[in-house]
Amino acid sequence: MPQLQTDSRPATARRSTSADIALIAVFAALIAALGLAPPIYAFGNAVPITLQTLGVMLAGSILGAKRGTLAVLTFLALVAVGLPLLSGGRGGLGVFAGPSAGYLVGFVFGAYVTGLLTRRFGERDGATSSFLGTLAATVIGGVLVVYAFGVPVQAWRLGLPLPTVAVGAGLFVVGDLAKAVISTLITRGVRRAGVRLPD
């Protein structure tokens, strides 16, 4: 009589799915928590400086492209239904029609690109090359991609020339690069601790 074999794959898949959901929720909460820091409206800019970009960078670099993107989408969905999770206590559909709308859309693509490039360039041999690869991935995804969406939409919503808005946004690059370095240090610390997420 043949022996029955128990297929553990469904149980493993359920555990994996539960873990994914938990991680996505944790990083969505992290992005929201970073919004507790008050926004800074510097140089008369209509779009504030916030710490939430750091959360987007971490979501992409630590969770990877897929989970990081889902974490950002979860966060934005909560904002869309009215929860005041953006820095300064903002929320609701109205924020997606304001001058910062492009940056919010950029969060999604920024997390995806950061995760994609971190996987490709941040896992190189050697501490220095891994750090530089992760930093490059974070700058490209978490800064350049976010700006690529944010600056044109800001110019459109405010009725200002694109070069004018681009110059104004450039004043914040140093701060965003500092956030990219912090994100890279945290990500490398997580990796050194032996945390690896499957694709």
Image: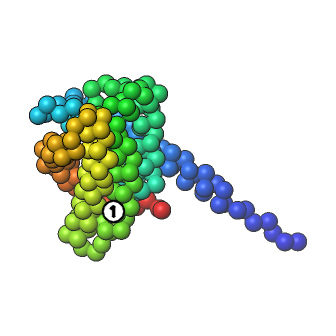
* Residue 150 seen in render: yes
Crowding at mark 1 (Cα within 10 Å: few <14, some 14-19, many 20+):
many
Which quadrant, please, contains the N terminus? bottom right
Which residue shows up at 19% across the image and 69% down it? 128
Q: Which residue in the structure is indicated by mark 1?
A: 118
Kindly indicate the quadrant of the structure image that contains residue 116. Answer: bottom left
**Residue kind at label 1, given as amino acid type:** Thr
> Mark 1 falls on what kind of element?
helix
Quadrant in the rendering for residue 103: top left
The number of numbered discs placed on residues in the rendered structure image is 1
Q: Residue 44 vs residue 58: left or right?
A: left
Whether residue 40 is visible, yes or no, is no
* Residue 87 at x, y percent in the picture: 28, 30
Q: Nearer the viewer, residue 39 or 157?
A: 157
Give the percent coordinates (x, y) of residue 94.
39, 27
Identify the residue shown where x is 42% and y is 28%: 93
Specify the quadrant of the image occupied by residue 78: top left
Residue beneath the point at 39% across and 47% down: 108
